[in-house]
Amino acid sequence: MLDIQSLHKRFGGLHAVNEVSFSVESGLIKSVIGPNGAGKTTLFNLITGNLPPSEGEICFQGTPIHGRKPHQIAAMGMSRTFQNIKLFHGMTALECVMVGCHSRSKAGFMAGMLKLPSTWREEQRIYQRSMELLELLELSDYAQVEATSLAFGQQRAVELARALASEPKLLLLDEPAAGLNIYETAEVARLICKIRDMGITVLLVEHDMSLVMEISDEIVVLCFGEKIAEDTPKNIQQNKEVIRIYLGEDEG
């Protein structure tokens, strides 16, 4: 699904991402973990086109995407959420999700202005699809509620629904459990597994290790921009270098 080879990102003399390579197989949940400043969000920004790489290659389903614009990458079948919730103020939960369908809409500006039948049919399709996603994430009762007035965990779910509205093959989640309590985190874990079971591959950045270990099929560990480990959750938990970085234990 995704193949990253020798990826670098430099900001002046700082190597935010340094010689990182890994792949994401279709149908898996793969997590990227590491301490603060490890380069995790920078990596996501490189993959989704928000930042250009200094060196290296990123291929999505066999097609090079480094250098493409975010909207072009989204149209290819990749979607993401953000560490800080980014919902539209003044919009209902339903309207926020409908916006996510824009990359799959076909009616142009003139057709919309003239209110052609094709535009009306497409608007109905977008409405139905958005309601289905809200129901899938158990938010249909809040469809007409202003999204930013919902509880924090529900806002996360709306953001997930909006990301799914673009019909992604690969979904990137940047710290989906940030700011959530233990019950909301458990609900997010359940939703992510539900998304994976729909056939959508998930690449996840997360600090909550209980969540990562519970739902991940594979884990990549970054430290100071470099990959130091890639393995199953069980083996990552036993990796001495990973333990040293997270717990500060002496080597040896």
Image: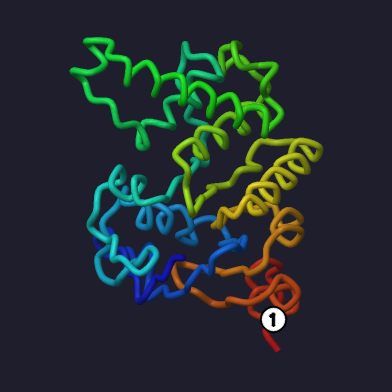
Residue at the disc numbered 1:
240
Please say if 203 is above or below 247. Answer: above
Residue drawn at x 28%, y 10% as measured from the top left: 115
Q: Where is residue 219 shown, x and y percent of the image?
A: 62, 68
Q: Residue furthest bottom?
A: 252
Decide if residue 34 is in sight here: no
Q: Which quarter of the picture shows residue 32?
A: bottom right
Q: Answer left or right for 98 relative to 53.
A: right
Q: Answer left or right for 147 relative to 153.
A: left
Residue drawn at x 63%, y 69% as measured from the top left: 218
Q: Is 107 or 215 nearer to us in this picture? A: 107
The quarter of the image holding the C terminus is: bottom right
Q: Which quarter of the picture shows residue 128?
A: top right
Residue drawn at x 59%, y 11% as measured from the top left: 144
Q: Residue furthest left?
A: 110
Q: Answer left or right for 39 relative to 179.
A: left
Decide if residue 41 is in sight here: yes
Residue drawn at x 74%, y 62% as measured from the top left: 213
Q: Where is residue 45 shown, x and y percent of the image?
A: 38, 52
Q: Where is residue 87 shown, x and y percent of the image?
A: 49, 25
Q: Which quarter of the picture shows residue 151?
A: top right
Please say if 98 is above or below 18. Answer: above
Helix, strand or loop at label 1? It is: helix
Please say if 219 is above or below 157. Answer: below
Q: How many marks?
A: 1
Q: Where is residue 60 shown, x and y percent of the image?
A: 38, 63
Mark 1 closeness class: few <14, some 14–19, many ≥20 residues within 10 Å = some
Residue type at mark 1? Lys
